[in-house]
Amino acid sequence: MTAIYSDGHTEDATHIATYEANDKEIAEADDTGHIKFFEQPGDVSVMVRYQGQVGVYQASVPLGAPVEKSPEPRNFIDELVFAKLKRVGMPPSTVTDDATFIRRATVDIAGRLPTSSESEGFLKSTDPAKRDKLIDRLLSSTDYADYFANKWGALLRNKRSNAQAMRGNFAFHGWIRDSLHKNMRYDEFARSVLAASGDMSQNPAATWYREVKTMQAQMEDAAQLFLGTRMQCAQCHHHPFEKWSQKDYYSFSAFFSTVGRKPGRNPGEEIIYHTRKVAQTANKKDGGTVKATGLGDEPMDLTVDDDPRHALVDWLSQPGNKFFAHTLVNRYWKHFFSRGLVEPEDDMRETNPAVNPELLEGLAQHFIRRGFDMKDLIRTICQSKTYQLSSIPNEFNSKDKTYFSRYYPKRLNAEVLYDAINQMTDSKPSFSGLPVGTRAVQLPDNSFNSQSYFLTVFGRPDSSSSCECERSSDASLAQSLHLLNSKDIQSKLSSGSGRAAKLGNVKDDRDAGAKIRELFLLAFSREPSGSEVLLARKHLERQIENDKGEKKPVAAKESYEDIIWALFNTKEFLFNH
Amino acid sequence: MCDGLSRRDFLSVGALGGLTLPQLLAAEQAAGSERSHKALIMIYMAGAPPHQDLIDLKPNAPREYRGILNPISTNVPGIQISELLPNMAKIMDKWSGIRSIVGAPNGSHDSFMCYSGRQGSTFNTNGQASGGWPSIGAAISKLQGTAKAGIPPFIGLAPKAGHPPYGASGKPGFLGAAHGPFKPTNHSKGDLVLNGVTEGRFGNRKSLLEQFDLFRRDVDTSGRLGGMDAFTEQALGILTSSKMAEAMSLEKEAPKIRERYGNGDAKNFGDGAPRNNTHFLMARRLVEAGARVVTLNFGRWDFHDKIYNAKSGVNGHAPIFDQGLAALIQDLHDRGMDKDVAVVAWGEFGRTPKINAKGGRDHWPNVSCAFVSGGGMNHGQMIGASDKHAAEPAERPVHMGEVHATMYRHMGIDPNNTTLADLTGRPQYLVDEWKPMPELI
């Protein structure tokens, strides 16, 4: 590490620079710059810092196993992923079976479990294009819009801060959902929100400005959401890991310096407008004035009549922009693969490079070329063999967590899990003020969390941050206790109109085997194994002694309750895998 | 651990060696989970207690300042406290008072400050780190995790209250719901005992689950699947072995001990917390069973009028509180737990020096008081002093953050060098610049 000073002299600064690896399971750097690698294969970056300068060293720890064959690539994703796997010597898992695929894709795209007849039909079908067709069907369903509106609603801070906010919450949620359903271009989606003007009652996208109040908050949220960049730190100091300075902070904020607001037609709602002035703001660091400037770009010459927010979106969505498309494709990659190419997904910077930079670039270019088409992006991802790999490791890749050599399982998120349990028990959730049967993924805002201990304890976000990390996926004892033993879930199980009651009713004269099969299709989208059927049958046919010591069969409803309970408490149910 | 490795050491070893949570838990069990652990019991005196009527009496001040209560001597020569706290007076050598607490942001009622050591509100996250400041219990849960299988690390005993911050047990903030307080007296209470199924039937269910649950654990390297598995295991343990329920059931306690704590009153006082003395005992039992942080909320000390009313005023609150807190401190000593368990009791601010026209005292953020005991700290002292009217700190103002720093240190965590990432990824210190209190350590 050589330091070159402004007077031209150079010095060996190796021993005074600081070094930090971004994945300490793979490698660790000491004070002298020595890097020690561990058993964990993967890509690692080591950041080198000295006097406000940063650099990064990237290393791959290969596994070095022979990669004899990978699945036939479906698209550029597979080519880039499999090429990397070959380089590091890590053979991918095999492509997963149909049952796992329909469950995986339906959860990831539509935020729900497949119905038993969907699964049955899919398993039976011999159509070679059935996976593609499933993806298309899911993308055109309203379930896709519901699920992704749920995701975006939290990120766009559609928060119920008070009772008056309700109308706006519903309208904004509806707007997000409709935009996704009709597949609005992503640049247009971003423009509709960031450059929203008018009365919230007529332009729901302007509701974003209600929760995101100040110029700085608007800039920080915009940067984190659409540029994958955390500017917060640069407000007070030159970020030590980052090139953005306070000047960048304020000049980027200036895009929001002309946002005006006045009372709208409904109480608590406002009219957002561009105040006729030049977009500039004070740099609090040196007291100077800075003009609106895209990150790393030249100051813009805007007139009083230019709404700088449109200039911002123009800057974001120009094909050469290095952040906008990259952030979205990385965000969506993480949605499907549990891990971003850049991780965390909203912290993209030189010192935090992507694990597969060619893939990130390839996805971004594809997304730009296809006209910022979000459904096309999802289709491309889900069609890839990479997405369709089994989660079951082979003898080499069980430790992989950065190369996507297999699918990494993820716990169903709070809403999906709640809906899935309702589906299993055939019960209808009821949230106050919404039609009975409204599913948790369809909830318009965060206010319903307080009605549902389930959603709270499983970590549904409160829309108070533009970071996906607000959604908690940590496990806790309270969650397990709730799943295993809460009154809420107990009453779903034992309800007189629930699935156990129906299956146990003599009017359903199907053989127990058919009923067990239905439950397995519903829970796991697969046929039960012989031993599983046997186990369930044994449970259904068991007898218990009553008070008089006589052996009596157990009511079928009760036994089905037990079986359903056991099924939705398995890891195979709780995880998308 | 027996060999002196802390759990954090263990975690970092785990990070290197690829140890997952269940393995960690198993390893801990193997290492002898009966080892003692550091713990904290924090008591929030909801509504802000009158410092000048409890431990900082001003007998020489004019009557409209000093009120009607008299100081009494304690078992430490030279220290006097209120006549309403006779039991605490008898064990003054086992606790310390702080007469100069500062740091309350304003006069709005909130447990937030007591539980996080930071300014902010239970209602919103304005001005806080992205996602909100975590309380000390949540931070400990995140940093140290479970001490003993089957007992959550962070437990809050406060029932819901009319004024929500009076019923809050400390928020998880940016650490997320999984690190929030386990509230056995609220939601989770119902989840602790079998709901609508007999023990026998639950046993059947459990064996069904074990036979169906054959999904391979090795598909997951993130530890989530294993984590879920470990908690499911613990939850099943709770429901079948009733370890948690046992810790909660006070009938297991000797009648003599229960009498010492008294019952107090389990009903919420107005929109405040209950004056439930069984919570003091339950806190001790939970800490003993493996909880790291237990919080409880007591009463409603917001005496704007008739502060000396024998039922609704400080005269109605303090004697019950005195019995409960003194019993807890004595009990911890009797059991040899006083080194491992620290106790803090305080409110969000103090009360006005001068009694108002309605015979009450109003909100006073300028100075307030705290009770600290255990943790192997120096006790039998009064720290700091207020001026002649108990209006402003006169000596050694102690910021609430300093008390938190002291408690983190007690838990074995360096309060000034440990950070947790907020929702923007920014590392946040546990307690800004506040240092552990030299008087106590």
Image (tube, coloured by chain):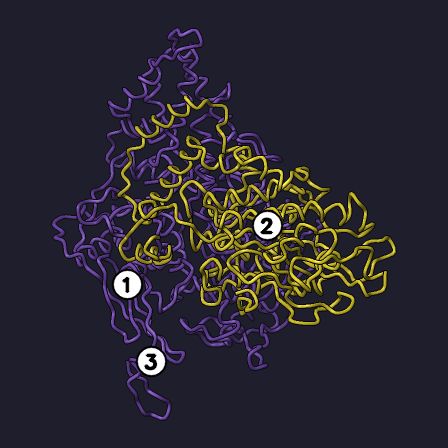
Chain colours: A purple, B yellow
Mark 1 to mark 2 CA distance (whole Å)? 43 Å
Q: Are marks 1 and 2 in contact (CB under 8 Å)?
A: no
* Separation of residues labelled 3 and 2 (CA atoms): 54 Å
**Which quadrant does the C terminus of chain A fall into?**
top left
The residue pinned by badge 1 equals A44
- Residue B224, given in percent of the width and then of the height, sits at 36, 46
Outermost residue, right side: B357
Give yes or no for contact between labels 3 and 2 (Cβ–Cβ under 8 Å).
Answer: no
| Disc 2 packing (10 Å; few <14; some 14–19; many ≥20) | many
Question: Which marked residue is nearer to the observer: mark 1 or mark 3?
Answer: 3
Disc 3 versus disc 2: nearer the observer: 3
Q: In the visual, does A340 lie left or right of A218?
A: left
Q: Chain of mark 3?
A: A
- Residue A16 — which label? 3
- Kindly state the secondary structure of the residue where label 1 is placed: strand
Mark 1 / mark 3, whichever is N-terminal? 3
- Give the percent coordinates (x, y) of residue A1: 28, 80
Question: In the image, what residue type sits under mark 1?
Answer: Val
